[in-house]
């Protein structure tokens, strides 16, 4: 029934359009249009140009101001402050150019409508003007580039030595995280050792791997530099932590990294946003297949002392999966148990 | 030069006798006439635009109304609608991927360059046809073949390619990663190779024709800006597309023959793959070495078309003709050295990133020059709002709006936050997608009388413009806000994240606007096909334009001009010249006939005119 209505409606609309076109073309033939400019439609289109400019300008300004808090994400990293300042500087510069040129475009269109009595102004070139609008944009862009490059240089600089090193690995379709454990060193891995339990392919012949632990949520200390070691094990993913203004691809076979300093704990952010359920999140921003949109990792920023407490409470992966002890060379097994905090009696 | 003359002599003959002997097949299907081939490209392009547009509506439904049931689409999509009446997430990605591929390559490259380069180059430079009609025909039929392969891939069981139009491996290399990376991806790659062959054949032809077959007097500094744009576009395509072939070929090897160009250290589907030593980033470099020039391949012809239309309909010379050519050339050159600005967050060397930031900002300068020149052309003009003119003005607006957001994304420090969010989607859809689309539509409205000998209905054109213009802004402008809020692109749904659970209202609005915009395109389609058969008969020069195509008969035969090809004496932008009788002086009017409006140096050149005419051996001694 619905289909029938749609079909009938469609045919009706089509017939009306055909009829209108027929009438309009007959009228235009009768008026001998085509030899002359149609003044009335020219006026209507000119007026619409101005109306479009005014209405869209008002809507844009109103919307941008009234919903500022919706699109302006709260900020929680040190370098993010630089990013945000640069963003709003660029917005001011480009916003000005955007408004100026669009206003001129629509205003000129409206103002200089066709008039038989008038001739257009024959103005084929003017080198001074060309130089002016080559040089001025070049200078403005140079200023933007330099502030941008300074920020880029700082953000991508080497991580401080005392950074908390944390590994994030993307796989279809989740993130896994690994902390270095008591020795503060991430152990080696080999993708050929990956299995259902050993997500990271940890290589336990490396003693540094014995005490590594892999929590389900990411905990970060406030005010300390954190270095993410990022990789993927199947396809490309991308680590995106919007509140930290952080993004870095996770590439199989090519580890990447990103360091930053979180500035607000989850609790502080909850207070600031007035949202008791606020949580930091990491999302995937490189299309990676069916579950791309589900790759969420919960991030919790703690006060440094809470963070240390949390860290101390975590059990090494090996201790949780003692079955893997059998894969460790015999002479290292005892060492591994000590490192992982497994009591030697259990064996 | 000699070859050009022989060709001209031959073609006068050709124009008289050849056409009467043509059968339906050689005239309309395997035609070597550039005008027919242009129409074939146009109609195929329109078909693909319709497909690509409808696909976008499908995924917009999912994004705008995630709660709605899409059960009613089951008759079309079958198993791709899940039990619960939702779009399958993988099919969603397939739609996104095919929308991108189709729009960028099949509509805005083949549909735009293929149509207007073919149609306008011989007509505007004063040639009988392309340098090689046969190669030109092959160009279309390779495109057709490519279209057929791509079209069939939409209907296979595992679905079409679905890893995004950029087909980054390993996702696109491993059928285990998603079902679209199986047969669908193979067909995508095959279709693209055919497509590139088509582009190559076309491009070589365009360049050769422009360099060799210009009529007497048509020096490079008298070429309409359309032709300059087509020349540079073809050059770009010729230099960059082969790199994509290389990238695709290596990907085919990785997929089918066990090589490891792009693959390394992969564990997927419960097993570790043997590949090692490859780099997925290598593919991205190769891809974007084409991919970035590609966006200029898309936009340059549109800019050329609008330069011509804005000048004609402002009744004013294009401001800064030489600066326009200069900025086109600058954009062409720079477009080869900015590709890695798509890759700031791939973990590339930060210093390399800095270099690409710098180069990217340089390319903004010639683009800005173009905008200011357009504005000055409109200033104190005598503007006639034909539908083509409206779409051209729309293009300039899009070019500005989408262009300024490029300054955010080209700045690596800002790109960290904005990369792969809706901000990028907004940016390139406005500056490249919509602007180029408007250029294409403007071209259709403007040259329709030359193509079909009839006029399109102007009133429907106005409705089409205003619905499209407001519609497109309503679709893409809000995406900036969504992007600034951090929403990632290619997401099937946002409900999994606290950070992205807002903006359901704006997403619904975008979807509604997308439907309205699409509806407007049906008005255009109706107007287009109706006018081919029933439109008002066109006068010879409906827009009172200067370029040569309007000196040809209303319905030009194969060979374009029945008699001698007109000689060119002036640049194409003598509009509203002080003292002239009319507000336009076509290119084929000698200065000796316009003594009332000649500038001092033009009066000088009258002496050369007679010489030009008598001596048929010299095509043009003012050339180069």
Image (cartoon, rainbow, N blue to C red):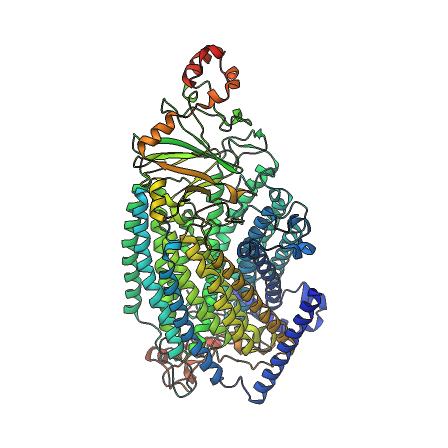
Front residue of this view, candidates A48 and A256? A48
Q: Position of residue B441 (x, y in %)?
A: 53, 68
Residue B165, percent from left and from top? 54, 50
Can see residue B15?
yes
Of residue B598 and residue A201, the one placed in the foreground of this image is A201
Q: Position of residue A252 (x, y in %)?
A: 49, 35
B547 and B248: which one is in front? Answer: B248
Residue B394 picture location, percent across and down = 45, 69
Q: Residue at x 66, y 76 (%)?
A: A15
Quadrant of the image occupied by residue B585: bottom left
In the rendered picture of this protein, how many numbered marks are placed on residues? Answer: 0
**Residue A199 vertical position relative to residue B283 in the rendered view, above or below:** above
Residue beneath the point at 69% across and 51% down: B78
Residue A253 horizontal side relative to residue B539, left or right:
left
Splitting the image into 4 quarters, where does residue B62 fall? bottom right
Quadrant of the drawing holding the N terminus of chain A: bottom right
Query: Quick check: A59 above or below A330?
Result: below
């Amino acid at each position: 029934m619905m289909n029938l209505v749609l079909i009938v409606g469609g045919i009706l609309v089509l017939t009306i359009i055909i009829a209108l076109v027929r009438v309009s073309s007959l009228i235009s033939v009768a008026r001998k249009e085509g030899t002359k400019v149609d003044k009335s439609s020219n006026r209507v289109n000119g007026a619409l140009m101005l109306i479009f400019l005014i209405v869209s300008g008002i809507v844009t300004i109103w919307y941008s101001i009234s919903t500022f808090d919706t699109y302006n994400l709260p900020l929680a990293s040190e370098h993010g402050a630089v990013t945000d300042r640069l963003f709003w500087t660029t917005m001011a510069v480009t916003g000005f150019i955007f408004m100026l040129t669009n206003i001129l475009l629509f205003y000129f269109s409206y103002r200089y409508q066709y008039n038989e009595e008038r001739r257009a102004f024959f103005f084929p070139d003017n080198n001074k003007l060309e130089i002016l609008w080559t040089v001025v944009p070049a200078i403005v862009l140079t200023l933007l580039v330099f502030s941008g490059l300074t920020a880029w240089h700082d953000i991508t600089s080497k991580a401080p030595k005392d950074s908390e090193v944390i590994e994030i690995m993307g796989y279809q379709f989740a993130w896994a995280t690994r902390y270095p454990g008591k020795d503060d060193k991430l152990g080696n891995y080999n993708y050929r050792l990956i299995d259902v339990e050993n997500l990271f392919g940890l290589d336990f012949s490396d003693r540094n791997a014995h005490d590594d632990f892999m929590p389900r949520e990411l905990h970060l200390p406030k005010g300390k530099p954190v270095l993410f070691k990022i990789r993927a094990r199947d396809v490309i993913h991308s680590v995106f932590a919007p509140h930290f203004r952080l993004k870095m691809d996770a590439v199989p076979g090519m580890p990447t990294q990103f360091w930053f300093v979180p500035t607000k704990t989850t609790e502080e952010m909850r207070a600031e946003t007035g949202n008791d359920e606020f949580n930091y999140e990491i999302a995937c921003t490189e299309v990676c297949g069916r579950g791309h949109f589900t790759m969420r990792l919960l991030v919790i920023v703690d006060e440094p002392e809470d963070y240390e407490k949390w860290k101390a409470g975590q059990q090494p992966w090996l201790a949780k999966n003692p079955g893997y002890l059998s894969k460790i060379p015999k002479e290292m097994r005892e060492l591994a148990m000590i490192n992982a905090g497994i009591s030697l009696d259990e064996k | 030069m000699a070859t050009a003359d022989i060709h001209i002599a031959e073609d006068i003959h050709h124009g008289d006798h050849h056409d009467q002997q043509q059968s339906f097949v050689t005239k309309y299907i395997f035609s070597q006439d550039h005008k027919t081939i242009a129409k074939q490209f146009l109609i195929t392009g329109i078909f693909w635009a319709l497909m690509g547009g409808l696909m976008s509506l499908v995924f917009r439904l999912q994004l705008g109304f995630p709660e709605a049931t899409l059960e009613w689409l089951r008759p079309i999509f079958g198993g791709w609608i899940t039990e619960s009446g939702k779009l399958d997430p993988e099919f969603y990605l397939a739609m996104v991927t095919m929308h991108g591929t189709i729009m960028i390559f099949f509509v805005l490259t083949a549909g735009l360059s293929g149509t207007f380069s073919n149609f306008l180059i011989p007509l505007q430079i004063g040639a009988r046809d392309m340098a090689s009609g046969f190669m030109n025909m092959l160009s279309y039929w390779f495109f057709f073949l490519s279209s057929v392969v791509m079209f069939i891939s939409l209907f296979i069981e595992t679905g079409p390619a679905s890893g995004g139009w950029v087909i980054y491996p390993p996702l696109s290399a491993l059928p285990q990663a998603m079902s679209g990376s199986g047969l669908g991806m193979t067909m995508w790659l095959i279709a693209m190779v055919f497509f590139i062959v088509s582009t190559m054949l076309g491009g070589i032809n365009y360049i050769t024709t422009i360099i060799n077959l210009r009529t007497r007097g048509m020096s490079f500094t008298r070429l309409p800006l359309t032709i300059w744009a087509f020349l540079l576009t073809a050059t770009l395509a010729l230099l960059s597309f082969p790199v994509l072939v290389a990238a695709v070929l290596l990907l085919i090897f990785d997929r089918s023959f066990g090589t490891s160009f792009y693959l390394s250290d992969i564990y997927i589907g419960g097993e570790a793959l043997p590949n090692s030593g490859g780099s997925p980033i290598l593919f991205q470099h190769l891809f974007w070495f084409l991919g970035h020039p590609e966006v200029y391949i898309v936009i340059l012809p549109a800019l050329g078309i609008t330069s011509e239309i804005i000048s004609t309909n402002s009744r004013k010379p294009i401001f800064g003709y030489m600066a326009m050519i200069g900025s086109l050339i600058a954009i062409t050159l720079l477009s080869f050295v900015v590709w890695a600005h798509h890759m700031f967050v791939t973990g590339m060397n930060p210093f390399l990133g800095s270099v690409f930031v710098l180069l990217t900002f340089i390319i903004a300068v010639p683009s800005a020059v173009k905008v200011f020149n357009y504005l000055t052309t409109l200033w104190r003009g005598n503007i006639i709002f034909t539908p083509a003119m409206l779409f051209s003005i729309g293009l300039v607006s899009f070019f500005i709006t989408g262009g300024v957001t490029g300054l955010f994304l080209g700045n690596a420090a800002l790109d960290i936050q904005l990369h792969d969010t809706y901000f990028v989607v907004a940016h390139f859809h406005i500056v490249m997608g919509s602007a180029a689309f408007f250029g294409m539509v403007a071209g259709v409205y403007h040259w329709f009388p030359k193509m079909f000998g009839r006029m399109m209905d102007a009133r429907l054109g106005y409705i089409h413009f205003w619905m499209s213009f407001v519609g497109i802004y309503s679709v893409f402008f809000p995406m900036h806000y969504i992007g600034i809020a951090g929403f990632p692109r290619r997401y099937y749904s946002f409900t999994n994240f606290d950070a992205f659970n807002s903006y359901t209202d704006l997403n619904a609005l975008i979807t509604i606007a997308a439907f309205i915009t699409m509806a407007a395109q049906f008005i255009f389609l109706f107007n287009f096909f109706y006018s081919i058969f029933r439109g008002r008969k066109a006068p010879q020069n409906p827009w009172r334009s200067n370029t040569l195509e309007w000196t040809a008969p209303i319905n030009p035969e194969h060979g374009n001009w029945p008699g001698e090809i007109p000689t060119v004496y002036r640049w194409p932008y003598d509009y509203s010249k002080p003292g002239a009788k009319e507000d336009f002086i076509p290119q084929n009017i000698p200065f000796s006939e316009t003594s009332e409006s000649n500038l001092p140096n033009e009066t000088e050149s009258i002496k050369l005119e007679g010489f030009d005419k008598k001596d048929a051996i010299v095509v043009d001694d003012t050339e180069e």
